[in-house]
């Protein structure tokens, strides 16, 4: 009996690290081990037979010279039924990349992340059952995987840690926009570390690039009531640039990880920060790619003399990119850093395949070649895309 007890203890010590590891997943035969343990009839050779480790390799793909991507929510990415046709679309057309939400605008992370501090916060909501398996399947088809992190808009974390959030001048409570959504404070170093941890952990699970979105102050709601906590002589754009610098510097210390930044489309044209802290020139030095969101429907009515800019996709995208290229050249940066988001959703007008193609043409006419398509519902004008053998 004593020998049997020692044997069982040794088996437990042998198995425990393997069973809790995030690097290996086990099939359902592991239940047999539990039954054997309970029955007290077990020897080591039995365990080796019934426990079959399924190793999910972590792979990465080098950034393609030309990136043509579509956006996918983590809810969609977690559904095989919906995701399989999207993968087929990428595989059969000129598309070669997908942008998948890591942390979306709700503040929730869509899959299990192997980081103790993030797990303590509790922001993980397992929408994608097995992120490594998904990325591995995409890589097998040579699909480049970009992970999107919504940075400062985060109602979940602002509610959990109000000391990390932007507050109101009037009463010191957490500030919220007109939709009731809160923002994290762009000066808070705990926020910086949280975002860095998410980015690095996601890279270790196979994401090839991290895309940062909502890297700004709020743009709507009662912004006059925001306590910006600006230090003397400091501007909102200085604070946003401090975040850029922190992320870029610390990621490069830890990983060979390409990073990209989403900016308002108007950053290509204006000279100020529009009150949100985004300035084109202050973004360029820190990122491998800059992605202005050139959605014609988001430009104000009358912009460039167009009653409804949404109906002029070529003209809006072309003008915006001309300005972006000029600013980038002036800063002595490579214009191939510019990888715009293009509109493939209907707002103010119905977007057809010809309208999407006209946006792409505006990109090509200026000597650029990469773009990403945005549709929050993940339903794209497939007819706008060239078949792979016709590229």
Image: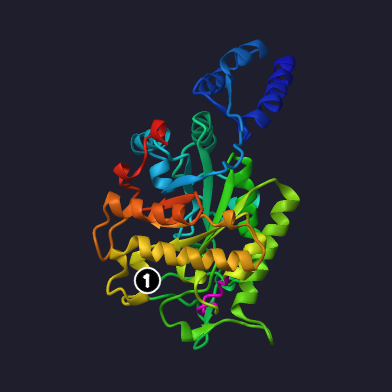
Seen from the viewer's position, the closer of residues 209 and 151 is 209
Residue 125 among magenta residues: no
Q: Residue at x 65, y 29 (%)?
A: 18
383 on left or right of 360:
left
Q: Residue at x 43, y 67 (%)?
A: 319
User: Element type at marker 1?
Assistant: loop
Q: Residue at x 60, y 64 (%)?
A: 328
* Quarter of the figure with residue 249: bottom right
96 lies above or below 120: above
Seen from the viewer's position, the closer of residues 105 and 113 is 105
Bounds of the magenta span? 273-279
x and y, in percent, of residue 155 in the image: 47, 65
* Quarter of the figure with residue 241: bottom right
Q: Main secondary structure of the magenta part?
A: loop
x and y, in percent, of residue 256 in the image: 69, 45
Q: Specify whether residue 152 is in view.
A: no
Q: Quadrant of the N terminus?
A: top right
x and y, in percent, of residue 144 in the image: 53, 40
């Amino acid at each position: 009996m004593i020998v049997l007890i020692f044997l069982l203890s040794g088996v437990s010590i042998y198995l425990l690290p393997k069973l809790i590891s995030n690097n290996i997943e086990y099939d359902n035969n592991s239940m047999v081990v539990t039954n054997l343990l309970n029955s007290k009839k077990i020897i080591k050779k039995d365990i080796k037979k019934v426990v079959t480790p399924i190793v999910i390799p972590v792979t990465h793909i080098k950034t393609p010279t030309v990136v043509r991507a579509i956006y996918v929510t983590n809810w969609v990415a977690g559904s095989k039924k919906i995701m399989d046709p999207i993968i087929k679309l990428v595989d059969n057309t000129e598309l070669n990349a997908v942008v998948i939400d890591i942390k979306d605008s709700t503040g929730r992370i869509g899959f299990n992340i192997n980081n103790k501090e993030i797990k303590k916060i509790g922001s993980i909501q397992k929408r994608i059952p097995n992120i490594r398996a998904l990325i591995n399947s995409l890589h097998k088809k040579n699909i480049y995987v970009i992970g999107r992190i919504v940075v400062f808009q985060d109602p979940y974390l602002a509610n959990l840690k109000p000391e990390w959030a932007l507050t109101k001048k009037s009463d010191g409570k957490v500030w919220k926009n007109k939709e009731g959504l809160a923002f994290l404070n762009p000066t808070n170093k705990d926020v910086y570390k949280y975002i860095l941890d998410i980015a690095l952990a996601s890279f270790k699970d196979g994401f090839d690039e991290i895309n940062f979105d909502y890297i700004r102050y709020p743009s709507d709601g009662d912004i006059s009531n925001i306590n910006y906590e600006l230090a003397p002589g400091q501007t909102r754009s200085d604070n946003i640039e401090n975040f850029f610098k922190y992320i870029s510097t610390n990621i490069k210390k830890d990983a060979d990880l390409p990073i990209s930044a989403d900016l308002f489309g108007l950053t290509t044209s204006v000279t100020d920060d529009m009150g949100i802290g985004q300035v084109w020139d202050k973004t360029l030095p820190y990122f491998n790619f800059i992605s202005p969101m050139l959605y014609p429907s988001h430009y104000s009515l009358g912009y460039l003399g167009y009653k409804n800019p949404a109906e002029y996709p070529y003209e809006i995208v072309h003008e915006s990119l001309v300005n972006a290229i000029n600013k980038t050249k002036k800063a002595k940066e490579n214009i191939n850093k510019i990888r715009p988001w293009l509109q493939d959703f209907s707002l103010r007008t119905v977007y057809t395949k010809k309208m999407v193609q006209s946006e792409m043409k505006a990109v090509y006419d200026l000597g650029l070649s990469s773009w990403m398509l945005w549709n929050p519902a993940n339903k794209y004008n497939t007819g706008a895309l060239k078949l792979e053998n016709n590229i």
